[in-house]
Each structure stands twice: as C-alpha cells, then as structure tokens.
Image: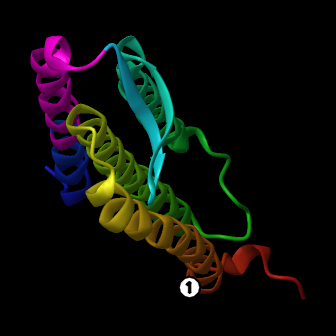
Amino acid sequence: MKKSERFHRITLVLTAVMYGVSLVWFLVSYKGLDDEIGIHFDPQGFDVFASKKFGFYPFVAGGILTFLFQLFRALSGRLKPSPKISEKGNEEYRALIKVFADCYTLLVAVFFFSWNASVIRQDSYIHCKYIYNGLVTFAPLMAVALFVFDVVYRIKYRNKENKKK
C-alpha cells in the first residue's frame, strides 16, 4: 500500500472517530443541556443562542465540508493533464492534490470537533483561543503552499516536447 493511500485511510478513520465521538458525546449530553444553548461564539463568549436542536449544525456543516473535500480528492484523478508538465509531473501533481484534500479534511474535522465540544460544554475558550486561531493561520498557509508547489512542478517536470523554440 502506498504511503498516500495509507494517509488517506488514516485521515478517514480519524475524521470518522472525531465526528463519531463528538456525536455520541452530544447525544449523551443532550438532555442535560438547556433548551436554549449557545451555538456560535467569539473569543468573548457566545453570541448566538438557539434551540438545542441547532447543536446538530456543526455535524451537518462538518459532514458537508468533509464530503466536498473528499469529492474534490476523488475528482482529482480526472484532471486534464497539463501539456506544460510531463506525464510523471501530472501524476505527482494529482497525488499532491489528494494529500492536500486529506489535510484539509483533517483540519475541518479538528475544527468541528472543537466546535462541537464547545457547544456541548458551553465554553468557547479552547476553541477560540487555540483551535480557531491555529487553523485560521494554517489553512491559508496550505493554500499558498499549493500554489508554490504548482510553480515547482511546472519547472521541475517541464514537458520538454512542448517547449517553445
């Protein structure tokens, strides 16, 4: 098994465990929650209160984002090859996109696990102080890294047959 496939499986297992644990935790805690709970917050505390049924929102939002990243990963194999990059370069580029999709899937899972925990505990401190700030910093860095890799792949795996004379 390739390292990328192993990483993909680990990603899916970790994501499922995070969502599963937080869902079970929410269901166990559901009766103990007030009828109106804080569901959205900022570093100062909760700013949106709604019925505790809305506590399921982070699961739905996280599930949708996870699905979209994994769909993006699955469709990366259908990318039209770039004539500017060699065949090996195109394969390597597709593999890189799959790794990035898995990394973003993990980021989303950590973010929503933390959000779920904050809603269940009705305490936003850990999510806002550590998780949110870290992911807001890390996600754009990953996006910039993808563009840097794009430039590197175009240079390293330049298609010599398609070079202008």
Query: Can you give x and y, in whole percent of width and height, for residue 68 in the image?
Result: 51, 33
Query: Can you give x and y, in whole percent of width and height, for residue 145 in the image?
Result: 53, 76
Q: Which residue lies under the disc numbered 1?
A: 156
Query: Can you give x and y, in whole percent of width and height, for residue 76 in the image?
Result: 53, 44
| Element assignment for label 1 | helix
Q: Main secondary structure of the magenta part?
A: helix
Q: Quadrant of residue 84?
A: bottom right
In this view, 101 is above or below 152: above
Color encoding of the figure: rainbow
Is residue 49 shown left or right of residue 82?
Answer: left
In this view, 62 is above or below 82: above
Is residue 112 shown left or right of residue 165?
Answer: left
**Kind of residue at disc 1:** Lys
Q: Of all residues shown, which one is farthest toward the right?
A: 165
Of 157 and 26, nearer the camera is 26
Query: Can you give x and y, in whole percent of width and height, for residue 70 in the image?
Result: 42, 36
Q: Residue placed at 51% from the left, 75% from the top?
A: 141
- Give yes or no for residue 21 being in the magenta stretch: yes
Of 88 and 121, nearer the camera is 121
- The number of callouts visible is 1
Q: Residue placed at 38% from the left, 59% from the top?
A: 128
Q: Residue placed at 35% from the left, 66% from the top?
A: 129
Quarter that holds the C terminus: bottom right
- Give yes or no for residue 8 being in the magenta stretch: no
Crowding near the residue tagged with mark 1, few <14, some 14–19, many ≥20 C-alpha atoms within 10 Å: few
In this view, 84 is above or below 25: below
Magenta residues span: 14-34
Is residue 24 shown left or right of residue 152?
Answer: left
